[in-house]
Amino acid sequence: MSISENYLRLRDDLPKNVTLISVSKTRAVEEIKAVYDVGERDFGENKVQEMMDKYEQLPKDIRWHLIGHLQRNKVKYLVGKVHLIHSLDSVRLLQEIEKQYEKSELIANTLIQINIGREESKTGILLENLEELLQACEECHFVKVKGIMATIPIGNEESSMYYFTKTKEVFDELKTREYKNITMETLSIGMSNDYKVALKAGSNMVRIGTGIFGKRNYNL
């Protein structure tokens, strides 16, 4: 199937309340355009510079999602260009986002990224540090938290369900609280190889790259 056919099949299979993010990292502008032309508007990028390059070349109604680790010195480039930052994972990063967005008097919409599997190779905040970050978010004026994002350890369906369920429990618990600047609207879990399990666990946003664009050619 073509890229556009892959996208349409996936979109039609997803529940109506689930947002599909087409992960376009390393993909050519022409490939992104093929999915855009059949209705997609939400695209996910890992690197700020790559997102900026594509932002300049593609239609301005695209909603760009920064789903990769965000370095503090790159935050300034995102202001006014990114729809949702999925990877808020520290108080220091939060403070930098607040500082840069204040300059333009714009609001940064973010998700808190949780390292639910406590993997040293992955970014994301550990659960024992989450409360400190939440308290810092309440003090902001230009950052809004819209939910939770997580990537999980590679495993089988049973282990995936365990980590997705654990993340959903955090999401649901936070949803019962009243915060300033924080609402639990979005649970961004699930990728190409495990999104069906994530949906069963309660995800309402999935990030799919290979399932739409095919496998990347790392030799290019």
Image (cartoon, grey):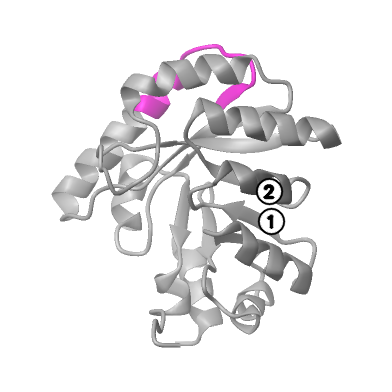
Task: Pick the residue in front: 73 or 119.
Answer: 73
Q: Is residue 14 visible?
A: no
Coordinates of residue 35 in the picture (x, y in percent): 61, 75
Image location (x, y in percent) of residue 127 = 33, 25
Alpha-carbon distance for marks 1 and 2? 5 Å
Residue 146 position, x and y percent, is: 58, 32
Q: Secondary structure at mark 2?
A: loop
What amino acid type should be assigned to the residue bearing mark 2?
His
Q: Position of residue 197 (x, y in %)?
A: 28, 51
191 drawn magenta: no
Q: Is residue 182 magenta?
A: yes
The residue that appears at 33% across and 47% down in the rendered structure is 122
Q: Quadrant of residue 37?
A: bottom right
Residue visible at 73% across and 21% down? 141
Q: Are marks 1 and 2 in contact (CB under 8 Å)?
A: yes
Q: Nearer the viewer, residue 138 or 59?
A: 138
175 up-or-down from 37: above or below: above
Q: Which of the numbered marks, if any, corresponds to residue 201?
A: none
Residue hosting label 2: 83
Identify the magenta region. 170-183
Task: Please determine whether, in this image, residue 122 is positioned above or below residue 166.
Answer: below
Q: Which residue is mark 1?
A: 63
Q: Residue at x 54, y 58 (%)?
A: 21
Q: Residue at x 44, y 20 (%)?
A: 174
Of 129 and 29, the residue lying toward us: 129
The secondary structure type at the circle numbered 1 is: strand
Q: Residue 158 vs residue 17: left or right?
A: left
Q: Amino acid at mark 1?
A: Arg
